[in-house]
Image (cartoon, coloured by chain):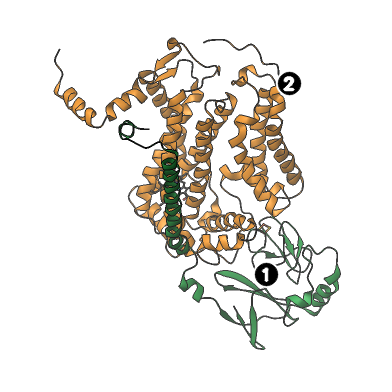
Amino acid sequence: MSKSNTQKAIEWFDYRLPIFSFMKHSAVEYPTPKNLSYMWNFGSLAGIALVLQILTGIFLAMHYKPDVNLAFDSIQHIMRDVNSGWLIRNMHMVGASFFFIVVYIHMARGMYYGSYKGPREVLWWMGVIIFFLMMATAFMGYVLPWGQMSFWGATVITNLLSVIPFVGEHVVIWLWGGYSVGDATLNRFFSLHYLLPFVIFAVVFLHLWALHTHKSNNPVGIDLKKDTDFIPFHPYYTIKDIFGLGVYLIPFTFMVCYAPEYLGHPDNYIPADPMVTPAHIVPEWYFLPFYAILRAVPDKLFGVIAMVAAIAILFVLPWLDSSKVRSARFRPLFRPLLILFFANMFVLGWVGAKPPEGIYITIGRLATFYHFAFFLILPLVGMFEKPKPVPKSL
Amino acid sequence: MSEQAKGAKTSTNPKDVSRRKFLTDMTTAFGVAGATCAAVPFVKSMAPADNVKAMASTEVDISDISEGDTKTVIWRGRPVFIKHRTGAEIAKARKEDTSSELLDPAKDESRVQNEKWLIAMAVCTHLGCVPMEGGEHDGWICPCHGSQFDASGRVRRGPAPSNLDVPPYEFLNPTTIKIG
Ligand code: HEM
Ligand code: FES
C-alpha cells in the first residue's frame, strides 16, 4: 500500500520538527494505568480550565482599562455594551472559581493516593508551585474591577509583606509604586495578571514532563511493571477526559448563565473608595481557609508565617510521610486522619468567612492546630500503622 | 560531555584543568554581577514615580471641625484623621498615659502638638484598613480584624502591633495645618 500525500507531508515535516512523533508518544501511545478512577480526570480538567481563563482573559483585556478612573466603568462597559461581553466576563469570573475547585480536588486526590511519594516528589513540587502562582494570579485579577473588595483586599494582602523584618515597609511601598494601593498598583497588577497564567502554563509543562517520566500513580498505589497493566492514552483516556469535560461544563454553564455572582461579593459593585473600609471584608471563597489561619494567630508576624507555612508545608510532605505504602486504601490510620484533614479544611473555610470574634476565634484556632498537627504527626503515623495487605499487581 | 567535545583534544594536565575552572568561575561571576546590575533599573522602575512623590504635602482648613468631631482628609493617597478632642477626652487620654493596658506605650503629650488636635494616619497598623469611630476608648475600631485605638490613636486591642502613625505636620496658623 502506498502512502497518501498527507502521510508523506506529515513525514516530511516530522523529520524536520518531530512534533507529530512527540504527540504520538505522549498523547496517543502514552501508556496509562488501566485502573484509573474518575479522580484522575481533574488534571486534564485543570489544564482546560487554565486555557479557558487565558482565552476569556485575552478577550476581556481588549476592552478593560487598567486606570483607577476608568477600570470600574470599563467593566460595566464590558457587561452592558460589548457584544457578548457579559458572557465572556461571567465565564472568566466563574471560571476562576471552578479552576480552584478542580485544583483542590486534584490535590486531594494526590494526597489520598500518596501520589507525592517517590519518585514523584518533583512532580508534586511543580504542583505546589502552580498552586502558589494561581493564588497570586487570582488575587491580582480580583483587584482589576476596582470595586471596594478589590481595593481593600489588595490593601490587606499587600500589607502582609510589611511583616518582613527591617525592609517590610519599603517593600510594600515599592510593590504599590506609591504610598497606598493606587493607579500604579492597578496598572502593574494588570500587567502581572496577564503574565502569570503563561508562567503557570510553562510550569504545567514541567509538571507533565515529570509525570511522563515515571507515569501516573493509580488507585492501588503500587508500581506497575507489566505491560498489561497499561492501556494507551488514546482512545481510552482521551474519551474519558472528554466525557469528564462534558460533565464539568454542565454546572459551569449553569453558573455562568444563572448564578454568575453567587460566589462573588456584592460590595465589589461599589467603586473603590480609599476613605472607607467596608464593615466586613472577606477574600474570595478559595482563600478563606488560609485567611482563617492568618486570623487564628493573634500576632501579626506569626499570623503571616502560619498562613504561608500552611501551604508551603506541602513541599516537605513527601518526607513527613514515613510510610512506604502510597494509597490510603491500605492505611487504616492515615485514612481517617486524612479525611478529618479534608473536613477540617471546610471548617477553616467556614470560619474564614465569619467575623473574628467569640466562638469563631476558638474554632479557628482548633482547626488551625489540627491542620498543622496532621502534618507533624505523619512521621509517627507511618511508624505505628499496620498497613493492610497490599496487592503485588493489579 | 557531548559527542563533539569528546572529539576535540582537551588537555587533562591538572594545571590546565584548574586554570580552565578558574576562568569559568570568573566568567560566571561576571555574568551574574552584570545581570544583577541590569536588573537594578527594572526594580527601581517599580518604586514610586516622581509625580507620586511630588504630591507629598496637603493643606487643610480645620476651622469647620467642631469640638468632638473628626474630619478625614487624604494625604499621599491615604486618609488622615483630624480629631478635635473634647476636654474630657484629653483628660482621659492623659490619665491613661501610665495605664498597663497600652500595647505600645506612649505619652499623649508626645503624640500631639496642640492638645485639642489629634492628627493621625487613618490607617490601621495591622493591615491598613480605615478604622471606624467606636470601640471602648473614645477612639476607633478597625472593621477588618477588630483592633481598637483610643482618643490618642494608641492601640488598645490587637492584632494591630503599634499606635496609629502621626504624620509630619505643622500649624500654619491656628486654623490651617499642612500635612507632609
Ligand atoms: C490562571 C488563570 C487566571 C485566573 C485564575 C484569573 C482570575 C481572575 C479573577 C478572579 C478576576 C476577577 C473577576 C471579577 O471579579 O470581575 C479576573 C479578572 C480579569 N482577568 Fe483574569 N484570570 C486568569 C487569567 C487571565 C488572563 C490570561 C488574562 C489576559 C490575557 C486575564 C485578564 C483579566 C481581565 C482583563 C480581568 C478584568 C475583567 C474582570 O474583572 O472581569 N485573566 N481574573
Ligand atoms: S487591618 Fe485593622 S485590625 Fe487588621
Residue A141 x %, y %: 47, 50
Distance between mark 1 and mark 2 Cα atoms? 54 Å
| Amino acid type at mark 1 | Asp
Percent position (x, y) of residue A98? 49, 38
Q: Is mark 2 on a helix, strand or loop?
A: helix
Tag of residue A340 = none
Image position of B30 with respect to A245: above or below: below
As helix, strand or loop, the secondary structure at mark 1 comes to: loop
According to the picture, the residue beneath numbered tag 1 turns out to be B165
Chain A on-screen colour: orange
Depth check: give the residue in front, A78 or A155: A155
Mark 1 packing: few (<14 Cα in 10 Å), some, or many (20+)?
some
- Is any atom of residue A91 visible in this view? no
Residue at numbered disc 2: A384
Nearer to us: label 1 or label 2: 2
Tell me where residue A321 appears, x and y as whole percent.
Answer: 64, 27
Chain B: drawing colour = green
Amino acid on which disc 2 is placed:
Phe
Q: Which chain carries label 2?
A: A
Pick the quarter of the image with the N terminus of chain A. Answer: top left
Tags 1 and 2 on a common chain: no
**Pick the front one: A188 or B45:** B45
> CB of residue at label 2: within 8 Å of ligand 1?
no
A322 is higher (above) or lower (below) than A75: above
A322 vs B152, nearest the viewer: A322
Q: Residue at x 64, y 41 (%)?
A: A310
Left or right: B59 with respect to B114?
A: left
Residue A5 seen anywhere in this rendered image of the structure: yes
